[in-house]
Amino acid sequence: MAARPYWKGQIRLALVSIPVEIYSATKSGATIAFNQIHEPSGQRIKYEKVVPGIGPVDVDEIVKGFEYAKGEYVLLDEEEIEGVKLESKKTLELTQFVEAQDIDEIYFEKPYYVVPADDLAEEAFIVLREALRRSNKVGLGQLAMRGREYVVSIKACGRGLVMETLRYADEVNKAASYFRDIGDGDPDEELLDLATTLIDKKTGKFDASDFHDRYVEALRDLIDRKKKGKTLNIESADGDKETRGSNVVDLMAALKKSIGDGSKAKPAAKKSPAKAAAKKAPAKAPTRKRA
């Protein structure tokens, strides 16, 4: 495997330890990077690390410091930080298992692929994978990576496992503070039927390749045209505000018109028979352990 593992260690389930390697499952998408330029000279602006009253300093003279009072710091070097003893630096212990749908999607942060570290670990790895798949459960534990400890979930994925880092409870804003001013009345039944019909009409299978970053493409086009010295027509933001301000339409008419315009609609997915399911209480959000 060409990629370097993001983390190497073991998954522990009771007395069973499985050596594994973890790889990032995602990569950064295309972006346009800008530099700051001094317009009169056309030269790029650079930044220096300076100390007030001293001036530029050597990188080797820089250490990390924690400000415990105004202007007062505790200094730590990399060896001291790396020396902090935490079992989860090398061991991911699965301490709890929950139904996959019990974790609110808002807590999921970043996915990683998990593979057995060697042939000897493969048998136990496959047993864990299939047990998770058969029980439709995800395992939870804590793992230290790159300077912090994460709550993580483990679930079956194809021939391997996927680990996802989870946000702690104090990292998620409470929805109630944002949603409290939204009315809780029932919508008009006919409007609801029209909206549901529109959703059904545009329902299809998800394919990530159907979507692309149009903003990056537009920026590239802008850069290419400027390189060729072409005249640019910049649209006024005021025009957009005026359009939005006067866009008062009848909701019923708009929904009916939307349903009638099927030119861009995807074929509807086949509906499966409805299944009654008991409503489960959402799992508690992960919380940080107090020192």
Image: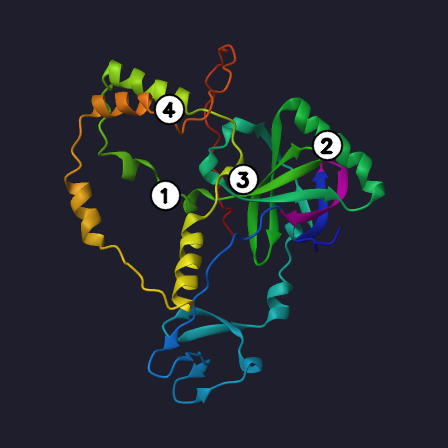
- Give the camera-side residue of 251 and 117: 251
Mark 2 to mark 1: distance in Å?
Answer: 34 Å
For image coordinates 41% across by 20% down, the residue present is 200
Image position of 257 with respect to 122: above or below = above
> Which circle marks residue 128 in the picture?
2
Q: Name the residue under label 4.
A: 262
Task: Tell me the kind of residue under disc 1.
Answer: Asn
Dot 1 alpha-carbon crowd within 10 angstroms: few under 14, some 14 to 19, many 20 or more: few
Q: Is residue 21 magenta?
A: yes
Q: Do the residues labelled 3 and 4 touch (CB within 8 Å)?
A: no
The numbered mark, 3 or 2, whose residue comes first in the sequence reads: 2
For image coordinates 72% across by 32% down, the residue present is 128
The numbered mark, 3 or 4, whose residue comes first in the sequence reads: 3
> Which circle marks residue 173 in the picture?
1
Task: Tell me the kind of residue under disc 4.
Answer: Gly
Task: Tell me the kind of residue under disc 2.
Answer: Leu
